[in-house]
Image (tube, rainbow, N blue to C red):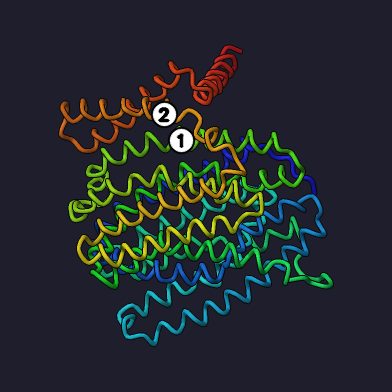
Amino acid sequence: MTINKSVKGNFIWNLARILLTIIFPLISFPYVSRILGTDGLGKVNYISSVSAFFVMFALLGIPTYAIREGAKIRDEKEKLGKFATEILLIGIISSTIALIAYISLFYFPEFTNYRELLIVFGFSIPFSIIGVSWLYQIVEDYKRITLQSIIFQVLSLIMLFIFVRDRGDFIQYGLITVFSSVGSNILYLIHARKYVKFFGYKKYNFKRHLKPILIIFGMSVASSMYLNFDITMLGFMKDETSVGLYSAAVKINRLVIVLISSLSTVILARLTYYIQNNNKDGFEKLLYKTSNFILLLAIPATFGLYLLSEPLILMFSGNEFKDASLTMKILSVNVLFAPLNGLIAYQVFMPHNKEKFSLYAVLVGCVINLILNVIVIPVYAQNGAALTTVLAEISVFIMGLYLGRKLINIRRLFNGIQQFLLSSLSIIFIYTMVILITDNIFLHVILTTIFGCAIYLTTLKLFKNELVLELFQIIYRLFMKKSKQRIY
């Protein structure tokens, strides 16, 4: 089974999926936040964050490990089928244990008022493991991943407007959230037969997978603790209103991070394939181009989110969430560091079988986050949680660079950063001009985004930035091609 798909093609399909994943929340979140309010939204996000830990235990480190190891044998259908079966069986066992542990929450008095939501989000635990979406990433079938995602996002959006109509409909919102995230997994499992045959093999070897899976799992635990535990701790140490405000800021922040990280998610299998076949030039060329792409997007996005935090919160969440604007300003720094940490962890350490380096880095972040959360959340609530998350992310970044210094050229990883920083200053100028011209917050966002991006890219072109010049060449070729088609 030979895979011959271009990184550009995969990127386009994955980017389309990511864009739609962003567009749908941009439609649904303003509606939900206004209907449910800070308390209703806080309840759902609180239980969602709790269930996320059990989903993490169910998944162990399986998806990341499976993509890396499966990419090495993706051209051998028999080996890939046996490998996929072993991974699926390990996942079934881990999800069963996680589900049993999750059920024990019903006996804790702290969760008495959340039992219905606990039942709803409990479905995400077994359904997360059966999706085998990692198989589609191994064979680079991003087209199917994208199309199924679109279908379930559209269905979820329709159900949202039909069934979530007042503040008491947070249970319905929870059900729709679960359906949106794991609904397509059954279809993934059924269609997977196109690529591999599950079961029917002899001499399964589960032991060889356990050590690397558990190392990646340890990394996932530590990472999730400093990325998600802030919401859980806010729920325990403060109140649902603080959770709702923090969730509003995090929602917008993470949507931007997901968009910026879209290329990184499609290249793990390809980078692993390069390493396995000793193609160092191919590995380095793809890696450094990806890091340049992340910097190209992340630096101006950080400036933009900081400046537009209040109008964005008001637009997408309403006046009730206005206090979340400072939280969003603090979190804007993460837009730069989170995608870079993802690149180092999954595109540098994983292909080199150095997942333990990722574990060390995120353990440092986790410890810093937990200690600081205990200190600052009681005093500064959601703003304290945001600050500790940023400091944890920066500590992971520094640790990742230190551990990866012998695997990659650190200086080359940040090639062109001076140009991106200088060009991003134009966004401040544009924003200042816009707020002098109009008081309309919608126009603040639209005009700053459009003119800020235009001047940013134009400035980079004047700097003769290679990535931007290539982007302009692609646009020019597409424009010329369409012009010729109209002529003929």
| Numbered mark located on residue 112 in the image | none
Q: Secondary structure at mark 2?
A: helix
Query: Residue under circle 2?
Result: 420
Q: Secondary structure at mark 1?
A: helix
Q: Quadrant of residue 33?
A: bottom left
Mark 2 neighbour class, 10 Å CA radius: few under 14, some 14 to 19, many 20 or more: many
At 77% from the left edge and 58% from the top edge, which residue is drawn? Answer: 80
Which x, y percent locates residue 312?
27, 44
Give above or below for 31 relative to 287: below
Which x, y percent locates residue 257?
43, 46
Amino acid carrying mark 1 in the image: Leu
Mark 1 neighbour class, 10 Å CA radius: few under 14, some 14 to 19, many 20 or more: many
The total number of labels drawn is 2
Query: Residue under circle 1?
Result: 295
Query: Foreground: 350 or 430?
Result: 350
Which x, y percent locates residue 277?
77, 43
Q: Earlier in the sequence, mark 2 or mark 1?
A: 1
Q: Quadrant of the C terminus?
A: top right
Which x, y percent locates residue 156?
44, 58
At 25% from the left edge and 68% from the top edge, which residue is drawn? Answer: 240
Query: Foreground: 382 or 430?
Result: 382
Q: Quadrant of residue 203?
A: bottom right
Residue 452 vs residue 324: left or right?
right
At 33% from the left edge and 45% from the top edge, which residue is drawn? Answer: 332
Q: Residue furthest bottom?
A: 107
Amino acid carrying mark 2 in the image: Phe
